[in-house]
Amino acid sequence: MDMKTITNIFIAGSLALAAMLFAACKQEESPVAKAVLASEQYIEFEAEGASPVAVTVFSDGNWVADYPSWITLSQTSGQSGTTEGVTITAADNKDAEGVLLPRRDTVKFHGNRLISYSYVIVYQKGDKYRGLAEKSLAEVAALPDGEFCSVNGPQVVAMDGNGFIVSDGTALMYIKSKQSVKVGDVLSFKGSKSTSSDLATLIDLEDFKVVSNKEVTYPAATDITSTLASYKFKAYDYVTVSGVFNGSKLTIDGVDNSIIANASADKALGNLAGHKATLTGYIIANSSTNFTMVVTGAEDNGLLVVFNLPFFDDFEWLEPWTTASSAGDAVGTSNPSSTAPNIFTAESCAGVLDELANRGYSIVNGWKGQDFVDISLDPSKSQNIVYLQTNYLKFGKTSYNAGIVLPAFNGLGSKTADVELSFDWCWQLTGKMKPDIMTITVELQGTGTLEQSVFESSQPTEGDLSNFAWQNVKVAIKGIDAGTRIIIRPTNADPSISSTRDQNRWYLDNIGVAVNGDITPGGGDDVPSNISANWFFDVDHYDTYGPTFGGSTKDADGAYVGTNDKNAGDGGKYIDSDEKNAVLTYVNIDKTSIDTAGKSVRNVGKTGEPYCAGAWPGDYWLYSMTLPGSYPAGSKIHFAGTMKTSATGLKHWKVEVLDGTEWVAPIDLQTATVDSDNVQYNVEMVGTDLNRVEFTYTTTKAVSSVQVRVTAMSSRQANDAKTLTAPNGGTIRFCGGEGNNSILEISK
């Protein structure tokens, strides 16, 4: 089609308006129209061979038409009433050398008054770039919007996921475009000048070419760290700033202004989440106190240890060494002779000591009746008697005792906390299946008190116990601080140990330290102004998340074998945030009676994304972070995460945040009718579409933890195929990938 007609403005209301105007003017009996309307407002013609367009003119009197010289009208005047078939024709937009520039003008139908004018915009296509000289970026910025131009030689100096910044020495310009470029590329292209966020830019790029690539020379960056609080937006300032990075935003404690960091995929800024960082780049925009930076460089200044409670270690990280050393599972297989390589001396355990030290552990050794000595994982010391099992540890041998010292809770600073210690332990058995008659003691070094002056676990009874059995121990501890060390060891000088039975051999797994009540500021310190937790569900985290959320074993294809669990609760499965200061769990309702097919599974895909099958109304995902003290009412809780369901997964979900003791919906609720039941939800899964769930909530009460849950609200499928009557294999997951990381944070 060689002609395009856009926007017919006449509907019944317009005709009614025209009729009223005509009626109002009848009594004046003027031959010249006071009210004129045309049936079109905009007409677009091809450059050559354009077909005429017919319009209808409505008038209450005589009318005439004004029009440019390149337009011809079949009728240039008319009388009162409706004049149909007035054709507008455009001459060819060319000369002897070819097609001319596009042109735009108006045709005016009118009477003798200004209010009686009816305008029809006429636009004719052409060669947008004919005769246009190449312009510098500074010259482009000075053009009025809509002007076309040709640019040759600007270089890409920075880029993010939406576009790139170019420089030609006269000016810098951000161009939003999906063109494939690299930093250093020298470009040529044509486009239309526009303005975006008060900055000049180019749109509708054509004839786009990468001419060459050369190294970028950057100007000296201005350090605005100390002046960020008062920094005023200047387009394309090249700056550097240091602070704490949460995965997308860099902040400085006590400063309202912050930096929103945009970067290309190769910058991998997600790896800096929870770290102190220095970012360098161009400032391109601001919104309130957030300044947007296109990053050219990033420096990792180390992990910000804000807080490291709750603490949990199930030793699943030992997996590479247990496989390499063929370590046994004495407790699981009831085999006292299970293979147990010494982590200090076995070649297959090389690296275990370093990893224990990196995690903050040390070892205490002692002989019957003697004080324990902290050997701090020094392999040169004697009596190195700690052994490896399938993802747990064995301590001690005949006449020699050994125990473990937990990492310091250095994130507490000068604060104190009341906590509950829990762990699983089991005694060793002799070849005749007789248990080592022993107890386990918990003691403290540094600040803090045990609920009992000395805690000792109950001892096995030789006559009653002739097998391995994990014993769970819980210990209340008050007032620990950053210098406190918790020691778990055999009880020395135990009178129940006879002169012929001097064996205190034991196994340890699943150590946890959870906050019991508020954390009390010490020394006048306040809680941090901001704490962030981030989860990056990607392939690099597959072997980190798989054992704790899916299962500890893999199938023949190398995929973790998911945990089939339809009992109420989280099944002990979780995913730590990268900062180890928060966890993600999936909590089931009790499905033992409704999930007869065993569809309920928790697992981690090879992409590193956690998912659950067999979801049912009442199940929920829970993001949870314990805080180092009480955050006052008016604090800001920010959450973001990307959800995805299979087509046969569940459609309706509700996100809530815990405000004090009350669960509140931070996103407006909607109501859907599902099989005659009204369902309230604020997260709707449509087919297999990604759904980014994000909010910032202002607390109305003081909070000592940040908790966000996303609950299944109906059994309607995401593809609307049907409403389920029992759990199926449909999945629900939180996604990874660029811009999809999960974030949980609080700020005062």
Image (spheres, rainbow, N blue to C red):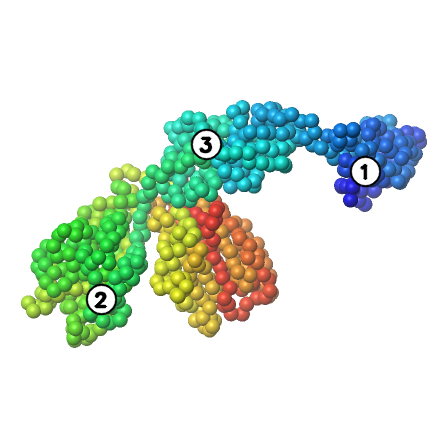
Give the position of the C terminus as an image quadrant: top left
- Choose between 272 and 100: the one closer to the eye: 100
Q: Earlier in the sequence, mark 3 or mark 2?
A: 3
Residue drawn where x is 10% and y is 65% of the image: 502
Q: Which residue is mark 1?
A: 49
- In the picture of the structure, the residue carrying the numbered disc 3 is 215
Label of residue 339 in the image: 2
Q: Residue at x 20, y 47 (%)?
A: 447
Q: CA distance from mark 1 to mark 2?
A: 89 Å
How far across and down, in percent of the image, does residue 49 sit? 81, 38
Quick check: 456 above or below 119?
Answer: below
Is 610 placed left or right of 513 in the picture?
right
Is residue 291 depicted above or below 376 in this figure?
Answer: above
On the image, the x and y values in percent for residue 97 come to 76, 29
Mark 1 vs 2, N-terminal side: 1
Callout 3 amino acid: Glu
From the top left corner, tell me how far across and down residue 55 is, in percent.
84, 39
Amino acid type, callout 2: Thr
Discs 1/2, front: 1
Q: Residue at x 58, y 61 (%)?
A: 719
C-beta proximity under 8 Å, tags 1 and 2: no
Between disc 1 and disc 3, whose residue precedes?
Answer: 1
Mark closer to the observer (1, 3): 3
Direction from residue 499 to residue 146 in the image, left or right: right
Mark 2 crowd level (few <14, some 14–19, many ≥20, 10 Å Cα) = some
Quarter of image, res 259? top left
Q: Is residue 295 above or below residue 340?
A: above
Number of residue marks: 3
Instruction: Give the amino acid at mark 1.
Output: Gly
Choose between 591 and 39: the one closer to the eye: 39
